[in-house]
Image (spheres, coloured by chain):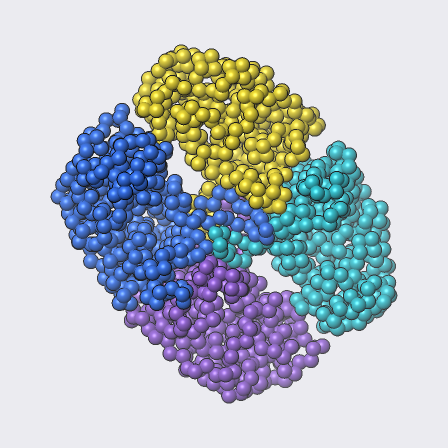
Chain colours: A yellow, B cyan, C purple, D blue
Amino acid sequence: MTASVSQPLAVGLIGAGGMGTRHAVNLHRFVPGARVAAVYDLDADRAAHAAAQSGGGPVCDDPLQLIQDPAVDAVLIASPDDTHARLTLACLAAGKPVLCEKPLATGVADAAAVVEAEAALGRRLISVGFMRRFDAEHVAVRSAAHSGAIGAPLLFKGVHRNATAAFGVTGATILINSAGHDLDSARWMLSAEVAEVRVRGLRSRADLHADTRDLLAVELAFAGGALAVIEVFVNAGYGYEVTAELVCQSGTAVSQQPDRALVRAQGQRGFPVPSDWLSRFQEAYVIELTEWVASIREGRAFTGASAWDGLAAMTVTNACIQALTSGAVTPVQLPQRPGLYEPVNNAAAP
Amino acid sequence: MTASVSQPLAVGLIGAGGMGTRHAVNLHRFVPGARVAAVYDLDADRAAHAAAQSGGGPVCDDPLQLIQDPAVDAVLIASPDDTHARLTLACLAAGKPVLCEKPLATGVADAAAVVEAEAALGRRLISVGFMRRFDAEHVAVRSAAHSGAIGAPLLFKGVHRNATAAFGVTGATILINSAGHDLDSARWMLSAEVAEVRVRGLRSRADLHADTRDLLAVELAFAGGALAVIEVFVNAGYGYEVTAELVCQSGTAVSQQPDRALVRAQGQRGFPVPSDWLSRFQEAYVIELTEWVASIREGRAFTGASAWDGLAAMTVTNACIQALTSGAVTPVQLPQRPGLYEPVNNAAAP
Amino acid sequence: MTASVSQPLAVGLIGAGGMGTRHAVNLHRFVPGARVAAVYDLDADRAAHAAAQSGGGPVCDDPLQLIQDPAVDAVLIASPDDTHARLTLACLAAGKPVLCEKPLATGVADAAAVVEAEAALGRRLISVGFMRRFDAEHVAVRSAAHSGAIGAPLLFKGVHRNATAAFGVTGATILINSAGHDLDSARWMLSAEVAEVRVRGLRSRADLHADTRDLLAVELAFAGGALAVIEVFVNAGYGYEVTAELVCQSGTAVSQQPDRALVRAQGQRGFPVPSDWLSRFQEAYVIELTEWVASIREGRAFTGASAWDGLAAMTVTNACIQALTSGAVTPVQLPQRPGLYEPVNNAAAP
Amino acid sequence: MTASVSQPLAVGLIGAGGMGTRHAVNLHRFVPGARVAAVYDLDADRAAHAAAQSGGGPVCDDPLQLIQDPAVDAVLIASPDDTHARLTLACLAAGKPVLCEKPLATGVADAAAVVEAEAALGRRLISVGFMRRFDAEHVAVRSAAHSGAIGAPLLFKGVHRNATAAFGVTGATILINSAGHDLDSARWMLSAEVAEVRVRGLRSRADLHADTRDLLAVELAFAGGALAVIEVFVNAGYGYEVTAELVCQSGTAVSQQPDRALVRAQGQRGFPVPSDWLSRFQEAYVIELTEWVASIREGRAFTGASAWDGLAAMTVTNACIQALTSGAVTPVQLPQRPGLYEPVNNAAAP
């Protein structure tokens, strides 16, 4: 890592859509020790807009040039999913730390190639944007379970609801785009790998496409015996909500919603529900970036998800897609984990 | 029904263990229009004790005599499970209303025989003690979903945790004794019959018998397409807790715990958890008995569970036992529902 | 008390408005060991309606005759406030147990006369309808504090909100009709008598009468040093809500709302708020009547509020009315408590 | 403000106790655009420790030199209360922005002198550390009330509990050190000035000093008619907790505790209570510093508390001290507010 402590880390952003722009603004406003040094997007106007909102750095017209630019210390990838693997490999080639939005790749082979390349390089440069690992509520659940006070975790229960999805959304899309987070949460919370999966799906309304399965019940069995059940409902209507529970040997811990104020009005005592993940996980995104920048500046491993975690999530996702089609219990075949990915203490930074 | 309005209903109790004694005391202290008219238990001392606590009525030394006794208007069965079918049939033969604790029988054939006998008789005399149908929290969930305000129910999510179970408890015992309630809740909440089941089980602690499966994940698919996932954990350690949630097309309703006071003490803000179902469902037991007595006195159908519900629960339970052993998705084969059991409005009485 | 155990207690109802009719129906449907034996109301149609809904007993055209009727064992008074003292005295004269809705009288002198008459009689016949003493949430708060686990109570905090009040409602009316319950709660929770009061009031909206004070902050200081602060807001708009908290030496206990189901819908996670006290306290009214009937049938003291409690509440109310007018700290002058009212264990019956 | 956007703001810290060190570490780790440029503490070891934890900047042996040092752009004062006014005046003299921990001064005259000096200078350099104005829960309550959806605020209700206080703590100390925050919250939430106060106090345990008043009930009346009631209990035993509620014309908003996970264990469902304000308000302290730094770098007014707010809080505190002694309703005499302090939009920065 070449950035000296006295200079802010120069971060290049690839992809200036909603997520990328959010990252740029967060980096600029809330993350110490870093600055947005360059922005690329296929749409140059979008890139210019994100740059303007995050310190006014230069716009770049080629993502590979951005990666290779000596003025860029580290790279943040928030471009379309099918570019992730290729760009991440380019970062490896350039020897630059990279935080890649999930998924690491759109297929298992591509994700495996990234892992192999990093393992061959022999040092950890890749981080994957499973931001829930930095969400205070998720961290509290994992900490409560891992404290030993309620015994070993046996069962992970996840809930993931989106207000609405595109009309023709397929089960595969839901599994890749939404459930990926839950699959990572389950692995991270249980500290174990998935051995087999089963997925049931239903169509929530008769006016949706006949093949739509917008409510999924995902069931996981883990090496070591733990189980997981995950509800993913992308047309839940009322808003966006994520919950994680760990049922342990003598107690349970369940994440709360970050409700700030109870409001009483019009015959109701209630809490507003966020409309999407950007508002729900705003603090987690900031903590994730803060930890990523600090880990680079301090020359230590990122405490969040690694390329291995990205590959594992993709492999389980793939098995889930097959399982949804077949209706059958489907085994998950992970390659041997390279030694590079020996778990470090992956509690989130304080 | 022969009891005149001016005379309290004379109820004979068969079985004076914990549940039966609780029913007797509840009937005596909290239910208008009825009295405990006779008590039978294999253990005469136990019978005498229950009688003494519930108005001092006579003890009877034969359950069939109790059923036939002209001084007994209606019968409450809380004896061991394997006596339920036979005693219920005797009540039918005597033409007397009966509230039988669940399960209606210990096997599907026996339960089917009871249903057939009642159908042949052509009038509804049998009620089954699924008391959750009278629990204010469960009723509120079902009412919220059935109000139409959040769309049709799609997914039932149940949680059923006991503090501890006997050392050698088998999955079959858990499915019969504990999960029966949840299977009834799912059917009742979704107003549909189960088509197939899958059950996964795990052993929560290494010091339990190797064959023990004390944490079960039960998955149901319903005719019409709805789903259910139910956690049944009989060694949850921290206490007794039941939760029911209906995920609907545009919202969800989830039962709350009947927390009376929040207590702040010693670094904690919290609520006590009940130790067992008798305290958790005390009000539901009283409402159930009150409604049962009122339905008899008013000559109308009981709004709770029928013999058909008892048969359906037993049939699903049986399929679950097979599914736990085989690991496979297992179909549920219900007989044709006799016309006698056309659903009435089964909202609990106000 | 002359009612034999085998005969239901014959209760005469005086006053068949909303509250009286509710009591009659509750007695008929939910309270064992009693029946509605006669109903009086100035409006004979209303009396007939209440009688029809509660078992069809006879309507009576004179309240004093009802009290003296040998067919009436006990009397329930829910007539207008200014009749309470006179009718209660008539019950004393007839030697009949009476449950009088609060307030016991509309003035301190009248309430004191009732207490003196009962003390002269030398036995407790009068109960006062402070139903919160039987509300599960209130009982849990008091029990938690009195368990010793969180030290002695120091401060009572009450909240009492009504959705709307009549346009011209005066502070005095609020103090008599609404705050009376809170004053009793504070006394009961703290097991102490009020020594002085201060009341501040404000008008919640500019379109109310200039003299209206519909939001009151009532402050009490107790003999022994404990304090109370009570918010009474009769135009709170959003619904009806009551909360009671006891701040103790090492912890606090605060009543929860009886929320049955959490509903997620339309961008909100919330609970419905009851519109009035009849729905909020329905269970408490039933438990109160059940305990009242049981105490009479068992020949023991009622565990709820006594005539002394009624006099004390009225005396404090009166001081509050003066305090609201004067703005000053106002002492409360209670007479010597007759020995008849030595506290019994006033925990609510289980 | 002379710091260019490209250089981090150089912040000098005066006072390296618990609070000051926390600020230094927060600035170093979590606040972009700033660095700890110098640290002073009377105890040089403490200063060195804080400097080492926050980037290793130099230790300074004189606070006035630190203020005048051209290498220091802005000053953070967390030294003992009785130094606040003098040091803040020195910052004014040096023309440097300063964030002074509350209280602004230990007496009204000193606070007024600071306000006069800043008003004479004619530009806002002083910010006061009422960090609750940046707490997400407090902001949500204020926003809900100020949104107009529940009408105008009428009554502020505050709760402020500390686990334990020093043995001989006086009411005056509690009012200055603890209640100051609540007095500021009430003013900020109601957007109004306090007109009069009344304070009642009690001693929570017999083993405390006879003069101790460790539980205070503070009552405020505001210009414009709003009211406030505030409980301050510094020996609450169970932990640290702050709550703020605004009762408005048609609804209320009440702050929630930042509970991350519900834990079920050992017969209890509960949440841990923080032990002190540093953990409870960690996020608020970071947001406060982030906003302070951003406001300086952007050359605009800080959205938190001003010197005027510091003077107003001190004036109300002083009246409360008199009121606690006298028992009387005590008027609050504020000087004319200089035009410099016209309210800007003081919603916290997003």
Residue name at image x 35 percent, y 36 percent: D26
Residue D105 seen in the current view: yes
Considering every residue shown, the one lying at the far left of the view is D120
| A27 vs C223: above or below | above
Position of residue A147 in the picture relative to residue D79 (left or right): right
Residue name at image x 21 percent, y 40 percent: D63
Residue C12 in which image quadrant: bottom right
Position of residue A97 in the picture relative to residue A254 (left or right): left
Q: Give the camera-side residue of C120 and D287.
A: D287
| B151 vs D157: above or below | above
- Where does the image place residue A304, in percent across and percent down from the top left? 49, 29
Q: Give the camera-side residue of B304 and A187.
A: A187
Position of residue A68 in the picture relative to residue D342 (left or right): right
Residue name at image x 45 percent, y 70 percent: C187
| B337 vs D207: above or below | above
Residue D223 seen in the current view: no
Q: Give the camera-side residue of C338 and B312.
A: C338
The quadrant of the picture occupied by the C terminus of chain A is top left
Residue C183 in which image quadrant: bottom left
- Where does the image place residue B5, in percent across and percent down from the top left? 72, 70
Position of residue D76 in the picture relative to residue A125 (left or right): left
Residue name at image x 17 percent, y 41 percent: D90
- Where does the image place residue C178, in percent across and percent down from the top left? 43, 67
Considering every residue shown, the one lying at the far front of the view is D45
The quadrant of the picture occupied by the N terminus of chain A is top left
Q: Give the camera-side residue of D51 and B309.
A: D51
- Where does the image place residue B260, in percent across and percent down from the top left? 54, 58
| C326 vs A257: above or below | below
Residue A183 in which image quadrant: top right
